[in-house]
Amino acid sequence: MADSMTAEPRPADVTTRPTGEPLIVLDHVEKHFGELHVLRDVNLTIHRGEVVVVIGPSGSGKSTLCRTINRLETIDSGTISIDGKPLPAEGRELARLRADVGMVFQSFNLFAHRTVLENVTLGQVKAKGVKPAVAKATAMDLLERVGVADQAAKRPAQLSGGQQQRVAIARALAMKPKAMLFDEPTSALDPEMINEVLDVMVGLAQDGMTMVVVTHEMGFARRAAHRVVFMDAGQVVEEAEPETFFTAPRSGRAKDFLSKIL
Ligand code: ADP
Ligand code: MG
């Protein structure tokens, strides 16, 4: 950027768009639910180290987009590849590729009858064959990183929503994913807990994690995103750097959406 020396510094350190190679590539992706056309010719490339915020009206296909990337939903046509490999339909290969992409949902989806530590340990042991002692050490490191190490022996229900969501992030990171998908990770939280989760996510972004984040938190987009992708009615309508998108959206649909949320 030509004016980067004189412009006000952005609040976070995630300033330059990474030039890493493509990590997640969607090519002409189409998806229907019955008659409903939910993804329409979606073409999207997420580069290694890139943080992409996806925004758009309710029902525009944002969750479906995330779920197809993780193969929780199949697609009708087009291709999705992760790190150069097309997503296979099923089998062991699918499980392995799915493990490359961690996912964090609006509802925390922790195992209710396991401790916090077990929640972050079990997947490593069961899906990756990590030795229990090693898995436990990794889990404690991650719980420390997200600021809930002191809650390790508790059950999820004993934690606040913000703490539970941070455990969910630690659990996803424990699988050593190449990328993380977040689908409205703060939408179910009380307002005072939103920032503690967003701060963890900004930290991940600063550490270079490749991230796709569906969120209406414009502050997060401004702090951490390299790119905003605006979806409407199953289409990627507009893509731009956050400042450009928020201050000068090009499409009428984006202008209309922003006028309602800002
Ligand atoms: P968003 O996350 O942007 O709100 P979604 O991806 O959840 O949008 O949904 C896109 C459209 O697909 C909506 O009209 C929704 O009702 C519909 N939809 C989502 N999941 C299903 C499903 N499993 N079966 C049928 N329709 C669905
Ligand atoms: Mg959604």
Image: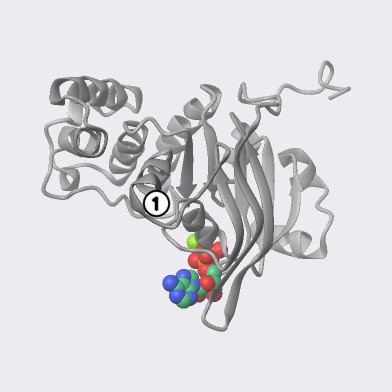
Task: Please state if 128 lies on the left or on the right of 188 as rendered.
Answer: left
Q: Secondary structure at mark 1?
A: loop
Image-based side of 214 in relation to 111, left or right: right
Crowding near the residue tagged with mark 1, few <14, some 14–19, many ≥20 C-alpha atoms within 10 Å: many
The kind of residue tagged 1 is Phe
What residue do we see at 56% from left, 74% from top? 32
Residue 64 image offset from top left, x and y in percent: 51, 62
Residue found at x 70% / y 26%: 19
- Taking the view exactly as shown, the residue that stands out farthest to the top is 5
Determine the image quadrant of residue 222: top right
Disc 1 CB within 8 Å of nearest ligand 2 atom: no
Q: Is residue 188 left or right of residue 201?
A: left
Q: Outermost residue toward the bottom?
A: 35
Q: Position of residue 92 (x, y in %)?
A: 33, 47
Which colour style is shown? one colour
| Residue labelled with disc 1 | 105
Q: Quarter holding the N terminus?
A: top right
**107 vs 39: above or below:** above
Residue 192 can be seen in this image: no
